[in-house]
Amino acid sequence: MFQSFEVTARPEQGPPRLEALRGELARAGLDGFLVPRADAHQGEYVAPRDDRLAWLTGFTGSAGFCAALRDVAGVFIDGRYRTQVKAQVAEFFTPVPWPEVSLADWLKDQLPEGGVVGFDPMLHTPGQMDLLVEALAGSRIELRRSENMVDRVWENQPAAPMGKVAAHPERFAGESHAAKRQRLAADLRAAGQKAALITLPDSHNWLLNIRGQDIPRNPVAHGFAVLHDDARVDLFMAAEKLADVADHLGPEVVQHDPAGLPDTLRALEGPVRLDRQSAPVLFADLLGDRAQAGEDPCALPKACKNDAEIAGAAEAHLRDGAAMAELLAWLDAQPPGTITETQVVRQLEGLRRRDPSLRDISFETISGSGPNGAIIHYRVNEETDSLLQDGHLLVLDSGGQYLDGTTDITRTIAIGSPDQDARSAFTRVLSGMIAMSRLRWPRGLAGRDIEMLGRLPLWMAGQDFDHGLGHGVGAYLSVHEGPQRLSRMSHVPLLPGMILSNEPGYYREGAFGIRIENLLVVQEAPALPGGDAHRKMLDWRTLTLVPIDRRLIDVEALSPEARDWLNAYHRDVAEKIGPRVSPVTKLWLDAATAPL
């Protein structure tokens, strides 16, 4: 299987590792050290070698950081992980609710007389550190560049990943890498910039139409790239990774040993574009005043999918939807109390693997029943595996990495007969998801301007959820892709071709969780009779086609518009997925998509 269920971190491992780290802090003259979840590429998902936060603390969430001081170690986590962190870290670590409590305020409370806090300049960005330095002004707390203190004490630290790189066919990419390089180089010239440093793996992988194997579940290859204003690229990536793509890359993409990047940065003529939100502090130091702040040149072009990428995503979702339908039909045939969370995961992966274009799952499948469903990013393992009992809700959040697209879908499924409280909450979540799916909006709005629509039914009941409404999704790339988001923190205007998730939820600790997720693509909205001809409007096309559990819907609580949308959606599911499933599943699908 792609997924395993082994326990990857234990609370009892943390205290001796923290003690060893503190010994190194004393020897280095430091009062603390910052341990982020990020690697040198600032990716959300990290290779085992870079999973320092989990190794030190036991916390395995995909976001957060630790500030390890001589006598206290704070583990900073956002609302998604407040429940999870309680089970994963030992009492020697202190969970800190973030961003409600800022790192600067916490450090000032813990080091009232000042002190020296070290950080690895390869693991933090200039944007992050500028804000922290400003917030610490007047506190007598010094932030000092340091070698990585965790690496000093991590025995048997895994080696750096060396997965082979493959060419991503142009029929899926929709554009040659030569055309992409020329297009982005023209933007550099227009900005008066000689080059751009690209540090995000999914960015230079997209630019060069390559895919890798360095990160579990995300088909990217680690490395760094310098794009010049004449469209040449210097690619800093181990030669052994690129052995199979030399002809694909051609003479205008030159491979270099990653160790040579610092010397190249020192020698580059400026101005050089540097994304201060994703590049390491060390690279900003090396470029000095030749660095010119600017967004990663690949970010928006990558986010706005072309016709081939959208067609590939749509086709991948049809095949993935058929696998999900087979799974849901199988699940409904299992009596409550007879199967476990891991059995559901194994069954779903087996169904997806029938597709020869599947290369991996797109993240560790979340299969959380009953109280486990309230852990937003629950990862089932051998010790937490639970039976699906009568009355439970099962939160099943999963996806696939196919050659033509990346999928991400969540369905909440009734096991037996859940109570009315759960059905009412489910209906509110569904109402928010449908409201966002139906939305038309004026061009120029960002995620922060519209995401509250998906929360409104919950707000009106005094409820909410502690995660964003949606994230960007790549084209056979990272399942979480920026810069687009449906989030109150996102200022990036939504543009045609962007793919985002729409996933409101509700979580009651110790009882149940609910989440419903479809992927949507932004498109130009057709004009409406009587509408303003001069106003350009956008709307959504829904990519995900999988039934939503009708048994959990309080039909009387749905608006007529929401009911009409759901009936039309289910007709679409039946028409497009029905021909792709087995006869037994087709019978189940017909019942699951019957109109309300």
Image (cartoon, rainbow, N blue to C red):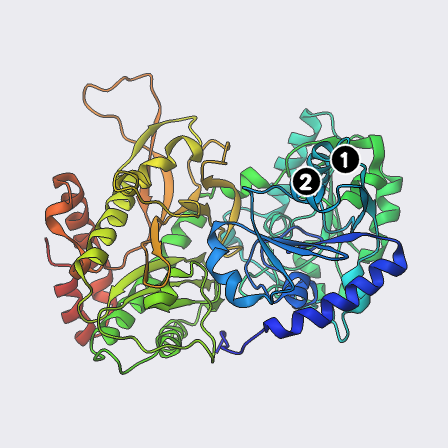
Q: Is residue 355 above or below residue 425?
A: below
> On the picture, is 513 further left or further right than 571?
right
**Disc 2 packing (10 Å; few <14; some 14–19; many ≥20):** some
- Residue 187 in view of the camera: yes
Residue 438, percent from left and from top: 26, 38
Three-letter code for the amino acid on which mark 1 is drawn: Ser
In contact (CB < 8 Å): disc 1 and disc 2: yes
Instruction: Determine the residue positioned at 25% across, 42% down.
Output: 461
Instruction: Determine the residue positioned at 49% across, 40% down.
Output: 484
Three-letter code for the amino acid on which mark 2 is drawn: Ala
Q: Which residue is mark 2?
A: 104
- Secondary structure at badge 1 equals loop
Residue 304, percent from left and from top: 48, 40
Toward which corner of the image does residue 400 lie, by quadrant?
bottom left
Q: Which residue is mark 1?
A: 139
- Secondary structure at badge 2 equals helix
**Disc 1 packing (10 Å; few <14; some 14–19; many ≥20):** some
> On the picture, is 476 further left or further right than 93?
left
Residue 572, percent from left and from top: 20, 53
Of residue 221 and residue 74, the one placed in the foreground of this image is 74
Instruction: Determine the residue positioned at 32% across, 69% down.
Output: 323
